[in-house]
Amino acid sequence: MLQLVNVGHKSLGDYATLASRGLMDEIRRLAEPLQGKRVAHVSATAFGGGVAEINYTLVPLMVDAGLDVEWRIIRGAEDFFNVTKSIHNALQGDPRSLTTEEQAIFRRYNELNAAEFPADDYDFVIIHDPQPIAIIDSFPDRGTRWIWRGHIDFSTPNAEVMAFLLPSLRRYDDAIFHMHEYLPSADGLPEAVIWPPAIDPLTPKNMALSPEDASYILDQFGIDVERPLLCQVSRFDPWKDPLGVIDAYRAVKQRIPQVQLALVGSMAHDDPEGWEYYNRTLEHAADDPDIFVLSNMNNVGAVEVNAFQVHSSVVIQKSIKEGFGLTVTEALWKARPTVAGRVGGIVAQITDGETGWLVDSSAECAQACIEILRDPAEARTRALKGKEHVRRHFLTPRLLRDWLVLFNRLAGNETGGSTITVVR
């Protein structure tokens, strides 16, 4: 059997003060015909990245709603995860295609994982992202409903790599994307559903944290809490552009010398490229004592990330490519002035000039940071608007509701007027 993830327990009732009464009633109504339905989430890792964070909340809330839900992790060695990282990059536009050997490695590990996965035991199987997408190929005859959930930007994929994955993708009953723009342009695809991800406002990473507690935590990492701090929370990945963030910080420092920068990330086992880019980031920082490059290897966990976001004068997410950008959602929820790349799902979260700042270069990023540091009142106004936008659109109860609507559709149940965006 694939490794089972222990997600603990969560109660829907705890979210009653964060979601509208109408939404909570809708969730309960949609859950009634799904009582006891068996659901399996399958992903590459239980640590690091948005998929894992979402599932640690979504899975126990599905259970609390009355479904029988498990989350399982595929197995793989370094050669497999090197290939899946190449696939991830290619689907976001990297021109490098897969070799015949790499394709064989990908298929072999998906077949090995399929052999350990009793898919027919479930009513619904949810496969997250490309790593396990081909598991479905080992189940040609099935009564189970299969759903593929993509979490990255497919707007400009490498055509050869996309063609390699399409035969598997076409076998799914539904495919879910963050945005309409992410749908691949190919024939014979499954029904496509559009909905954004969400954050859990009650996790240690997003719960209310006092400024005093945040300052105390940052002081432990050597941050001068009396000086302004720029911060980016992300994996060490070329698509997140930490080197460009350092360049922006240096431009800000020429105008505001007391500024500091924290680059905070997590190192996941399915991200071998991350270690290489982490080292490149350290080299680019060039021993600047006001640049702090930190990760879970420095005992940075969920509460520490929360503290960095809460305390930061500016939260940056200077992505070049972005599936959705949950770190942006987190910063907006904490009412922090947020500067982010004008890409992917970020543009669904930030309206430039209203709920934050959208930028297209390191120079623009630097200029936005300077504006924020010099006009904190205007920055606060935008930040509060950003928080309200997240409350209405990007919190976990809405995400749970969307899944329940989809399950009912696939089961042939009436949804009582509850809808999701289906594009084909």
Image (tube, rainbow, N blue to C red):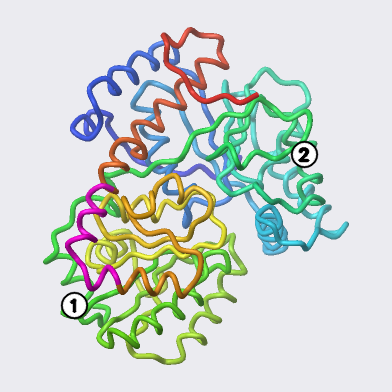
| Residue at 76% from the left image edge and 43% from the top image edge | 165
For disc 1, the marked residue is 225
Q: Secondary structure at mark 2?
A: helix
Q: Which amino acid type corresponds to the residue marked 2 in the rendered image?
A: Leu
Q: Position of residue 362 (x, y in %)?
A: 47, 73
Residue at the extreme right of the image, as rendered: 100
Looking at the figure, which quarter contains the C terminus? Answer: top right
Q: Is residue 128 above or below residue 37?
A: below
Say whether residue 45 is left or right of residue 105: left
In the depicted structure, whether residue 218 falls above or below residue 62: below
Q: Residue 124: x percent and y percent?
A: 57, 24
Quadrant position of residue 308: bottom left
Residue 298 x %, y %: 37, 75
For label 2, the residue is 166
Left or right of 313, for residue 244: right
Residue at point 14% right, 65% down? 213
> Camera-side residue: 299 or 258?
258
> What secondary structure is found at the residue carrying circle 1?
loop
| Residue 30 screen position, x and y as percent | 39, 15
Image mark count: 2
Position of 298 compared to 226: left or right? Answer: right
Q: Residue at x 39, y 67 (%)?
A: 232
Q: Nearer the viewer, residue 16 or 125?
A: 16
Instruction: Using a 10 Å C-alpha cutoff, classify the residue at mark 2 as few (fewer than 14 neighbours), some (14 to 19) or many (20 or more).
Output: some
Res 367 label: none
Decide which of tag 1 and tag 2 comes sooner along the chain.
2
Q: Is residue 218 magenta?
A: no
The amino acid at mark 1 is Val
Give the magenta-colored segment's residue range: 371-385
